[in-house]
Image (tube, grey):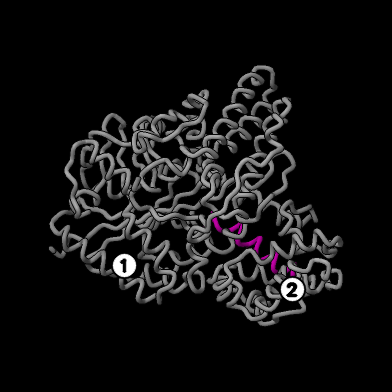
């Protein structure tokens, strides 16, 4: 391989949380946004700051950006003006009066052990002892009347200490002191911990903005509330990869194109408010693409999008290309999708899933050596082809809690090794567009990064039922909209957007953990109920009834799924 030609590699991390905030009451139902900020988004930016030669693409979901801003304001408001914090778990951390009722205490205890048992609880002996007591107390709720407030205070502190980023635990003297104290945490200790949390919330977006300003990262965006845009446009596109898939009773989503354009427009505007410029790249929600959805992105000014390997595989097959076992022959380049005006990159599922599902149980050096070995083999096969690029795309939060020390050693070694490797060039998707012509893709088969299909969001009874419920709400919104005032209409429109997000449909169905399904199913019905309330209409009775229950135990709790090709 000539010395001046290196294999282009793009590490693309997608940062995303759905809307956990009740837009009517302002209260947060689940704490995952602020917990992932103080752990994963903080660690991810710190690793890039520590290796200035490393480069990456960071994609943000707009609803995540809005929630981060809201949390930062909540903590600042509490610390400066004693304003109420609207997240129950975060509020409990600094409350001098912990819950008096047995039911509230049990709920709090259960919340404070929702963490990876091996990597986040078992790692800290003091937290592990508290968690063991929590398990016993949950099984014997009548005994918690003898529980002291100090136990609850210590459990709350340890839960948040365990959820902090590894870089924070290693670098912040205040956190080191709290870790060393182990027990007997005072109200002052809890307030100090909240101060650290507030700083992390306030600083995380500016830190990414600084990396973008110096050209180390490319920032991209997803449509506003993370909808599956191809399905908003046309349910039947799901059958391009799944010809026999059952579809909702609703023939099509009413006004889908207008809603898709709204999500794209609002996503761009939210990004611009946070980062000061307009992005040129888009990771469509879940990498879900179709030719019509890519056309909308191109019309909105985007130059590139990305999706899954399975989508490209299915598209090439339906375009008449013969099956080829070597990915070097078809995967590692960007494609110009016919009639869309967009260039599209496609995820290497194997390499991405090694990081997401396999390397967590390996020693960090062995994992990085293995990944580098794979890339060296690809580089050798792609020698003399400067247009080739390997796209490693995955979410930037859910994998790391399964790694020792929140992947501290893995990510640090990964960035150092790849940035220093003589045969590998860490780059961005936009820079790839500048250096090579796109290959023509005559036909695109609609699908996503999961299995190359849209089966995660449509085609099963509970998922289809979710779409029918959403369609009812959209019809009610359309009927009420002409009579709403401007402010009321805007609130209802944003509530509708939340209901159109992909996350609810991800969890509907029997192959997901029951506890998590219950959380998201209940929140989906609450969001739909809020929409009816905002437009002045009575919610249908079925919104008072549970309609889907989980029962599976997928790897990593169902938050991620391997992106293998669909087999069925």
What residue lies at 56% left-to-right and 68% top-to-bottom?
Answer: 165
**Quarter containing the N terminus:** bottom left
Judging depth in this view, the residue of 353 and 488 nearest the camera is: 353
What residue lies at 44% left-to-right and 54% top-to-bottom?
Answer: 561
Which portion, as a residue range, is magenta?
189-207
| Helix, strand or loop for disc 2 | helix
Image disc number at residue 371: 1
What residue lies at 43% left-to-right and 53% top-to-bottom?
Answer: 58
The answer to whether residue 538 is above or below residue 59 is above
Judging depth in this view, the residue of 451 and 21 nearest the camera is: 451
Crowdedness near tag 1: few (<14), some (14–19) or many (≥20) residues, C-alpha within 10 Å: some
**Quarter containing the C terminus:** top left
Q: Main secondary structure of the magenta part?
A: helix
What residue lies at 70% left-to-right and 81% top-to-bottom?
Answer: 181
Q: How far across and down, in percent of the image, does residue 468 sit? A: 56, 30
Judging depth in this view, the residue of 303 and 118 nearest the camera is: 118
Q: How far across and down, in percent of the image, does residue 10 sit? A: 33, 56
Q: Splitting the image into 4 quarters, where does residue 144 fall?
A: bottom right
- Marked residue nearer the N-terminal end (2 or 1): 2
Q: Is residue 144 visible?
A: yes
Q: How far across and down, in percent of the image, does residue 455 sit? A: 43, 42
Image disc number at residue 154: 2
Q: Splitting the image into 4 quarters, where does residue 534 fall?
A: top right
Query: Going by the image, does 440 lie left or right of 85?
Result: left
Q: Is residue 33 visible?
A: no
The answer to whether residue 441 is above or below residue 199 is above
Judging depth in this view, the residue of 146 and 85 nearest the camera is: 146
């Amino acid at each position: 391989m000539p010395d001046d030609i290196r294999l282009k590699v793009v590490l693309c991390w997608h940062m995303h949380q759905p809307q956990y905030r009740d837009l009517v009451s302002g209260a947060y139902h689940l704490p995952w946004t602020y917990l992932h900020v103080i752990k994963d988004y903080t660690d991810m930016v710190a690793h890039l700051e520590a290796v200035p030669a490393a480069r990456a693409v960071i994609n943000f979901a707009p609803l995540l950006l809005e929630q981060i801003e809201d949390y930062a304001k909540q903590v600042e408001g509490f610390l400066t003006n004693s304003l109420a914090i609207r997240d129950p778990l975060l509020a409990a951390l600094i409350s001098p009066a912990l819950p008096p009722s047995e039911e509230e205490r049990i709920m709090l205890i259960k919340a404070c052990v929702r963490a990876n048992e091996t990597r986040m609880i078992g790692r800290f002996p003091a937290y592990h002892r508290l968690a063991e007591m929590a398990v016993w107390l949950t099984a014997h709720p009548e005994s918690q009347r003898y529980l002291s407030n100090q136990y609850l205070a210590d459990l709350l502190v340890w839960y948040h200490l365990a959820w902090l980023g590894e870089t924070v635990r290693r670098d912040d003297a205040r956190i080191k002191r709290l870790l060393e104290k182990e027990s007997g945490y005072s109200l002052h200790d809890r307030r100090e911990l909240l101060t650290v949390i507030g700083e992390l919330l306030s600083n995380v977006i500016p830190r990414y903005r600084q990396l973008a300003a110096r050209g180390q990262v490319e920032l991209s965006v997803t449509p506003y509330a993370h909808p599956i845009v191809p399905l908003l446009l046309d349910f039947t596109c799901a059958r391009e990869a799944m010809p026999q898939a059952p579809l909702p009773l609703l023939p099509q989503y009413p006004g889908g194109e207008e809603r898709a354009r709204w999500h794209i427009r609002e996503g761009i505007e939210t990004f611009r408010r946070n980062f000061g410029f307009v992005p040129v790249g888009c990771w469509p929600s879940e990498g879900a693409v179709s030719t019509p959805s890519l056309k909308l992105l191109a019309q909105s000014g985007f130059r590139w999008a990305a999706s899954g390997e399975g989508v490209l595989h299915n598209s090439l097959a339906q375009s008449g290309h013969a099956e080829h076992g070597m990915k070097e022959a078809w995967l590692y380049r960007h494609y110009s999708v016919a009639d869309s005006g967009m260039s599209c990159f496609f995820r290497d599922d194997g390499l991405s899933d090694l990081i997401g599902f396999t390397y967590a149980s390996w020693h960090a050096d062995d994992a990085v050596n293995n990944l580098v070995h794979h890339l060296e083999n690809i580089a050798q096969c792609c020698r003399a082809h400067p247009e080739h690029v390997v796209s490693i795309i995955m979410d930037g939060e859910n994998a790391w809690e399964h790694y020792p020390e929140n992947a501290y050693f893995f990510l640090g070694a990964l960035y150092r090794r790849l940035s220093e490797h003589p045969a590998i060039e860490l780059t961005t998707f936009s820079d790839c567009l500048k250096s090579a012509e796109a290959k023509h893709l005559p036909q695109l088969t609609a699908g996503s990064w999961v299995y190359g299909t849209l089966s995660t969001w449509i085609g099963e009874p509970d998922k289809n039922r979710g779409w029918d419920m959403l369609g009812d709400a959209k019809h009610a919104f359309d009927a009420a909209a002409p009579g709403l005032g401007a402010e009321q209409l805007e609130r209802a429109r944003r509530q509708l957007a939340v209901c159109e997000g992909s996350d609810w449909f991800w969890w509907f169905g029997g192959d997901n953990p029951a506890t998590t399904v219950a959380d998201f199913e209940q929140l989906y019905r609450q969001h739909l109920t809020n929409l009816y309330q905002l437009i002045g209409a009575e919610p249908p009775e079925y919104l008072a009834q549970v309609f889907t229950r989980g029962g599976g135990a997928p790897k990593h709790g169902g938050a991620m799924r391997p992106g293998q090709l669909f087999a069925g």
